[in-house]
Amino acid sequence: MAEVTAAMVKDLRETTGVGMMECKKALAEAGGDKDKAVILLRERGLAIANKKASRTAKEGLIASYIHLGGKVGVLVEVNCETDFVARNDTFKEFVKDITLHIAAANPRYLGRDEVPQAVIAEERGIFAKQAEGKPAHVIDKIVDGKMEKFYSQNCLLEQPFVKDTDTTIQDLLVAKIAEIGENLIIRRFTRYQVGEQI
C-alpha cells in the first residue's frame, strides 16, 4: 500500500475541493490511488456538496454562546441559502457546535486567506531563525511545515473540531452541506474573553 503524502492529499483536495482530512481518509482507503479516492469521495457526496459552494447563501443565523460563568463569549454568523434551512434543527445544531468550538479553540482567523501578510512574514521569520544552521532547502521545508501547523492552530476552518479531532471544521462544514443540501458559509465570528486585550 502506497504511503499517503501531504502532496497527494493537496492534489486530491485541489481536484475535488473536499477538506484535507476527508481527502487523506479517502486516499488511505484507496491505497494511495487518486482515481479511486475521487470515486470514494463522490460516493460520500462530499464532492457534490462542494459544488454547492458557488450558490448564494444570504439567509442563516447569528448565534451567541457564553461560557465559564460569563468569562468567554462568542458571536458567529453562519449563512445558508433559505430561511427554511435556517430554522432547521440540523442547521441550528451545526451553528451551536461552531460557537462551542470557537469558545474552546480560540481561533484568530476564519481561514488562511485572512491572515495578514505581516503576520505570515513574522511567523516565517521566527521559524527560519529556529532552524538556523540547517541547509537552506531543509529550512524551507521546516518553515513550510511549521506554517501549516500555525494555520491549523489559528484558522477556524483548519482547526480540528473539538468534538472530533479527526475532522477539521472545513470537513465538518462540507459534510453538513452534503447532509442539508444547501451551501453553508461560516461568514464571521468574534470571541471575547474577560480581561483579554484586543
Image: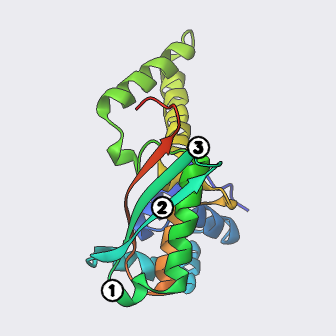
Question: x, y (%) of residue 31?
Answer: 68, 67
Q: Residues within 10 Å of mark 2 (few under 14, many from 20)?
A: some
Residue 120 got which mark?
A: none
Against 14, residue 6 (above or below) is above
Residue at image point 32% right, 82% down:
81
Q: Earlier in the sequence, mark 2 or mark 1?
A: 2
Against 14, residue 115 (above or below) is above
Type of amino acid under label 1 = Thr
From the image, state whether disc 1 or disc 3 is nearer to you: 3
The front one of 48 and 116 is: 116
Type of amino acid under label 2 = Ser
Q: Is residue 19 left or right of residue 31?
A: left
Type of amino acid under label 3 = Lys
Residue on which the image places disc 3: 71
Against 1, residue 39 (above or below) is below
Residue on which the image places disc 2: 64
Indicate the secondary structure of the residue bearing disc 1.
loop
The front one of 127 and 108 is: 108
Q: Earlier in the sequence, mark 1 or mark 3?
A: 3
The front one of 155 and 135 is: 155
Give the CA separation, mark 2 to mark 1: 21 Å
Residue at image point 31% right, 35% down:
116
Question: x, y (%) of residue 188?
Answer: 36, 56
Q: Is residue 185 left or right of residue 179?
A: left
Indicate the secondary structure of the residue bearing disc 2.
strand
- Quadrant position of the C terminus in the picture: top left
The front one of 97 and 167 is: 97
